[in-house]
Amino acid sequence: MPTVARAARTDAGLASELRLSVMRLRRRLAGERHPDNELSMNAMAVLGALHRNGDLTPGELATHERVRPPSMTRTVACLEDGGYVARRPHDTDRRQVVVSLTAHGRATLLADRRRRDEWLALRLGDLTPDERAVLRAAAPILEKLSTS
Amino acid sequence: MPTVARAARTDAGLASELRLSVMRLRRRLAGERHPDNELSMNAMAVLGALHRNGDLTPGELATHERVRPPSMTRTVACLEDGGYVARRPHDTDRRQVVVSLTAHGRATLLADRRRRDEWLALRLGDLTPDERAVLRAAAPILEKLSTS
DNA sequence: CGGAATAGTTAGCAACGGTAACGAGTTGTG
DNA sequence: CACAACTCGTTACCGTTGCTAACTATTCCG
């Protein structure tokens, strides 16, 4: 039996092992990304958020991605440089900025979405249906943990 | 229904949403770490690996933590500076180095292990027993994904 | 009107991970 | 035995990513 499974039997160990597993898997995901992917994982996540939620302000994007505003400013600036998003002033509150997906950004998102999950989808394919079901149930719980 | 739950119903979406959730949770975990924790998360993970597996070489540690050898060299050097680990030459193969946990390192690991899971354990406490059970089942699967 | 609060940005810094190149030691082979 | 090929760890260097602090512009409120 893997060490993780043994330790995760207790609630105390669950926090510890879940944290280590999440860290390692994230590192692996960052490394296994397709090489001809010109945008970072976080930049792609921003495109995904815009695609899903429509136009957002940098502040909303920062909150959504759990990043500080200056970090999101940089990511958005990088995306704007590449023509993936457009920035325009807010209609009524001129302090705010509205970020929206361009056609190029949307096309990039959809094209990459297939490729960029290649590795993980491959690994998921190696799992049993039961294991995939567990992960399917776990994904929203992990999301809730990072949001709460 | 949260967006993640909807998207994760399909296998294609599972890879995508799992990846985003893992990334966000990891970022959150890195940020919510207890402030008086003098070692980085990765350094603590190395102490944990030594505690669990006994003495290891830098190469074995690098493989285990899914980083490149130079990165592990740096982490081990930092740990040695703080007196958390000791390095000695390998008995028979003098190319290799054996890293072992010192008493100070072990004490730090055990003391921190309680504190450093504080935030996650707190969040886990907000979940239902069923949700915790899902995560308990998911942890070894996530581990398997990053190891395979 | 004038001060507090808010949104975004800029500047500077630290942590972390990667590649390339190198030295020491080991192994295999002519 | 000698020398080439390989392995392990390390050093040097670079890019990415996230943060805090400080600044500007704008809005809100007393």
Image (cartoon, coloured by chain):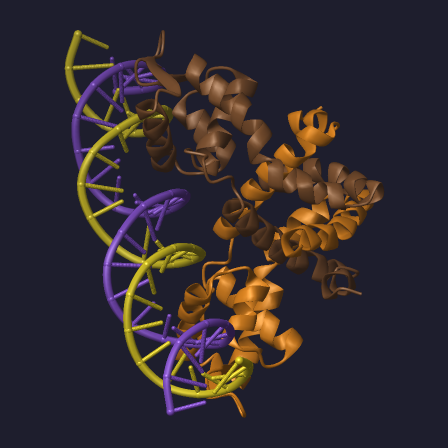
Chain colours: A orange, B brown, C purple, D yellow
**Residue drawn where x is 51% and y is 39% of the image:** B34
Q: Position of residue A45 (x, y in %)?
A: 56, 65
- The one nearer the camera, A90 or B147, is A90
- The answer to whether residue B132 is seen in the rendering is yes
Total marks placed: 0
- The answer to whether residue B148 is seen in the rendering is no
Q: Position of residue A15 (x, y in %)?
A: 65, 36
Q: In this rendering, is residue A35 above or below A137? A: below
Quadrant location, the N terminus of chain B: bottom right
Q: In this rendering, is residue B50 above or below A129? A: above
Q: Position of residue A27 (x, y in %)?
A: 51, 46
Q: Position of residue A56 (x, y in %)?
A: 57, 78
Quadrant location, the C terminus of chain B: top right
Q: In this rendering, is residue B51 above or below D21? A: above
Q: In this rendering, is residue B102 above or below A94? A: above
In the image: residue A120, left or right of residue B96:
right
In the image: residue A144, left or right of residue B85:
right
Residue B92 placement: quadrant? top left
- The one nearer the camera, A37 or B39, is B39
**Residue drawn where x is 75% and y is 28% of the image:** A9
